[in-house]
Image (cartoon, helix red, strand yellow):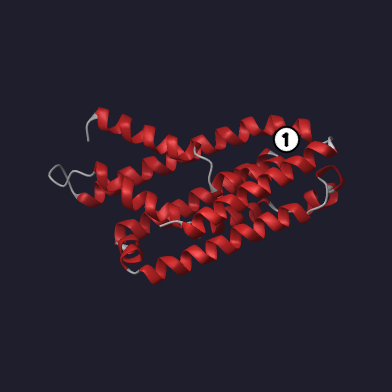
Amino acid sequence: MTSNDWIVYMVFVVGFALTPGPNMMLYLTHTFEYGRKAGWATVAGISSAFLFHITATVLGLSALLLSVPEALQILRYIGVAYLLFLAWKNLKTVKWNTAQEEKESLSYWQFYWKGLLGNLLNPGTVLLYFSLIPQFLHPDQQHIIKQNLALCGMQVLGSTVTNTTIVFVAGFAADALMMNGKYQRNIRIAMSLLIVVFALKMLFWR
């Protein structure tokens, strides 16, 4: 790939990361509720799931999922159910400023696993790899697997840097909202509604 190809590719990668979706809703919810470290732990789980999708892409699993509609449907329904569960739980949780003991008892591994599971059950990630990456492959230049790994690796790096930066910025809002019960409630409702919207989008996606 030429330098121009890499620039265009990374613009797409960062653009996808900046586009609100299930992953963003998940790590922003945790950031607003539990702070930056919880958000970053969630991002770490999301990035780890990207590694699974990379392996699936290289081995051809993504192509299999897209060629067998039933498999992708099952993955979609599980993902929708998980998102709706997160939206319900977000509304059900007690106020942030009255849940200090609960916060201290939570392990960052829990946020990591939530991020990992959420991204594994996101069929949009499968489509991202399957539709975007092949556009930048050049079979006549070098081994196709090496190109695939390089492109996937840069996608993980670009998405992780973008997501961690968003968490850092969102952390300032989280600090300001921690002691304001009204804003806490409004943020919870807004985040849950957004999660439901993306769940419905995932449900009716074709």
Amino acid type at circle 1 is Ala
Q: Position of residue 149 (x, y in %)?
A: 31, 48
Residue at 68%, 33% (x, y): give it.
171
Instruction: Check the image and report above or below for 20 versus 79.
Output: above
Residue at 44%, 40% (x, y): give it.
16
**Who is closer to the viewer here, 161 or 22?**
22
Q: Is residue 35 left or right of residue 19?
A: right
Instruction: Check the image and report above or below for 68 versus 139.
Output: below
Residue at the extreme bottom of the image, as rendered: 70
> Which residue has dot 1 on it?
174
**Residue 34 visible at all:** no
Q: Is residue 43 left or right of residue 170?
A: left
Residue at the extreme left of the image, as rendered: 140
Residue at the extreme front of the image, as rendered: 204
Residue at 25%, 44% (x, y): give it.
135
Q: Is residue 129 left or right of residue 38?
A: left
Q: Quick one: label 1, few (<14), some, or many (20+) residues within 10 Å?
A: many
Q: Position of residue 178 (x, y in %)?
A: 80, 37
Disc count in the image?
Answer: 1
The quadrant of the rendering that contains the N terminus is top left
